[in-house]
Image (cartoon, helix red, strand yellow):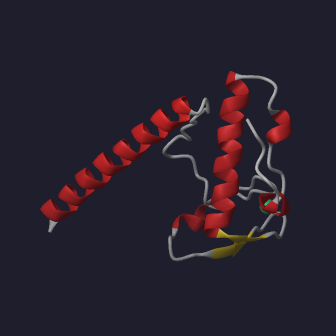
Amino acid sequence: MEQDSTLSRVVADASWSKFVSMLEYKGKWYGRDIIKVPTFYPSSQLCSTCGYQNKEIKNLSIRKWVCPKCGTTHSRDHNASINILNKGLDILKARTLPVSSLRLDSVESLNEKPPLL
Ligand SMILES: [Zn+2]
């Protein structure tokens, strides 16, 4: 059983590595920046509205939660996607200025057309 788990992880890591290298290749081809968000960035735990970190959300079975600080209701994956986008934009901002106007501040703005970089 342990061996299967290890093998699955090796296969998953290799697939992810290949996916990232293909993404970097395509990004370079089209003149786009590919930004890697740190592996342990707590994207699911952070409230994308106020920044509060809810450590109870480590439990993957929790799909929706209400921020105890600001009261915003979050869908786990949607909230994480906003946080990942904003973290990537922060990393990009630190590299190249100015991109401060690209920050995503609300869930509603996800329905808008994405900004061109
Ligand atoms: Zn909040």
Residue 53 seen in this snapshot: no
Rendering quarter of residue 33: top right
Q: Position of residue 39 (x, y in %)?
A: 48, 44
* Quadrant field for ligand 1: bottom right
Give me the residue at 76% from left, 40% from top: 116
Q: Position of residue 48 (x, y in %)?
A: 75, 56
Q: Is residue 89 above or below residue 105?
A: above
Q: Is residue 98 above or below residue 46?
A: above
Give me the residue at 58% from left, 52% from top: 42
Rendering quarter of residue 63: bottom right
In the picture, measured across the screen, residue 41 lies left or right of residue 65, that is: left
Q: Which of 81 and 47 lies nearest the eye of the viewer?
A: 81
- Tell me the quadrant of the picture where the C terminus can be found: top right
Q: Which of 9 and 108 lies nearest the eye of the viewer?
A: 108
Give me the residue at 54% from left, 35% from top: 27
For this orientation, the residue located farthest to the top is: 96
Rendering quarter of residue 4: bottom left
Q: Which of 26 and 103 lies nearest the eye of the viewer?
A: 26
Q: Position of residue 84 (x, y in %)?
A: 63, 49
In the picture, measured across the screen, residue 115 lies left or right of residue 18, that is: right
Give me the residue at 81% from left, 55% from top: 50
In the picture, measured across the screen, residue 4 lies left or right of residue 58, that is: left
Q: Position of residue 61 (x, y in %)?
A: 51, 77
Residue 77 seen in this snapshot: yes
- Tell me the quadrant of the picture where the N terminus can be found: bottom left
Report the label total: 0
